[in-house]
Amino acid sequence: MPIIIGAIIGAISGGVAYTAQAIRTGNWNIGQFGLSVLGGAIIGGITGWASPMSVIGASIGQSMATAFIGGLMPAYGVQVGDWSFSISPSIAFGNTAGIGASLSVTYSAGDFSFSGGVGIMSNSNYNGLGKNGMEIRKSILASYDDGKNGFSLGTNIWSGTDGMKEFSQTTGVVGLHFGDFRAMYENDGGPVLKQTGLGGGTDSYRTAALNLSIGEFSAGFNLFTGARDQSKDPEKWAVTNSVDGYSRKYTRGYVNETGTKYRLGALTVGYGGYRVGVNSEHLRHAIQDRVIHGMIKDAGFENQSWDWKGYSQYRTSNGFTSW
């Protein structure tokens, strides 16, 4: 049943989005309309299979409104000499539902560019964590790109209102570009990002994200935890070989968390703005606790469950962040 519901919602959303785009551009093609409906149905069906609760609790009216706004509101850009300015809508549905806008300004000097941006997003049930509210992102990004290869470093300062206020932090970003291949890694700490001050070093909330892409195809992960209280960390973590309730080994024990122990361990593949995959502590524990924290001889975040859940998300792409 969730697959059917998801397919219906997706088909309607795809048709509504194309209709809104046709109204905006004045171009209508029945074949493209059919493909939009079919594509929406396929993505919606996959969403229903991967994340049944996201479609069972979904509102067709809300999905239609989101799709219509996304199709009707294009990105606008203006070039003035070496400066460029843009504003675009931000749309999300799936594990997170939301709508907002993103503004950016970029100065280019040859192969170098420097960008600043602000994003505002009204979120509902953010990443399935039960948090609602306005998310505010302020970003800075410095890049070198000769059209074939490139490198970038940036920072994102997160704040919010209502439930999203709790997730205030600073994350750092490093990006690579080689031909058709692109990679973006985002973390609030870790080597380079912590030392340069691009990441806040809190090891909390949006703790790590990786996005690898070739053209429109992508794969990656997003890891989210609760707040870590590093004031109680020892100077050096001793080897304790602790074992949690799911028989998972923690070489150096557990970090100190305050408040709710949020967890997200999403591993996904995607096309365009769509991503589908799985969400599990199996993945978060392996990537964060065993690999990332293992390399720096740090303690891990204790597992809070040991099941597998589906994960699906559509989100307007943004060059500043993988979140």
Image (cartoon, rainbow, N blue to C red):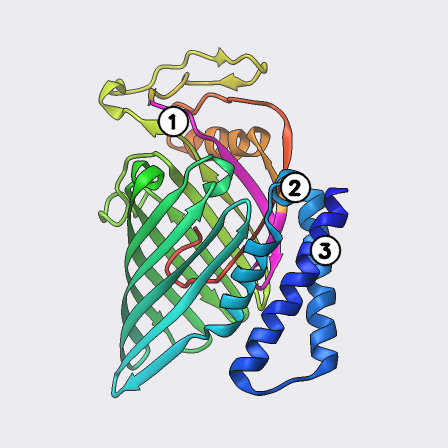
- The reply to whether dot 3 and dot 1 touch (C-beta < 8 Å) is no
- Is 167 magenta? The answer is no
Between tags 2 and 1, which lies in front? 2
Q: Residue 179: where, in percent of width, then height?
A: 52, 71
Q: Residues within 10 Å of mark 3 (few under 14, many from 20)?
A: some
> Is disc 1 placed on a helix, strand or loop?
loop
Residue on which the image places disc 1? 297
- Tell me the quarter of the picture where residue 139 sits: bottom left
- Which residue shows up at 68% across the image and 70% down it? 36
Quadrant where the N terminus is found in the figure: top right
- Is 260 magenta? The answer is yes
- Which residue shows up at 27% across the image and 38% down it? 201
> Is disc 2 placed on a helix, strand or loop?
helix
Q: Residue 99: where, in percent of width, then height?
A: 44, 57
Q: Which residues are magenta?
A: 259-276
Residue on which the image places disc 3? 8
Residue on which the image places disc 2? 56
Q: Residue 191: where, in percent of width, then height?
A: 32, 43
Q: With 138 as the anchor, is 173 left or right in this view?
A: right
- Which is the main secondary structure of the residues drawn in magenta? strand
Looking at this view, is 143 or 91 the one in front?
Answer: 91
C-alpha gap between disc 3 and disc 1: 49 Å
Looking at this view, is 21 or 280 the one in front?
Answer: 21
Q: Is residue 189 visible?
A: no
| Three-letter amino acid code at the position of disc 2 | Ile
C-alpha gap between disc 2 and disc 1: 42 Å
| Three-letter amino acid code at the position of disc 1 | Lys
| Three-letter amino acid code at the position of disc 3 | Ile
Q: With 124 as the anchor, is 51 left or right in this view?
A: right
- The reply to whether dot 2 and dot 3 touch (C-beta < 8 Å) is no
Q: With 65 as the anchor, is 133 left or right in this view?
A: left
Q: Is residue 3 above or below residue 292?
A: below
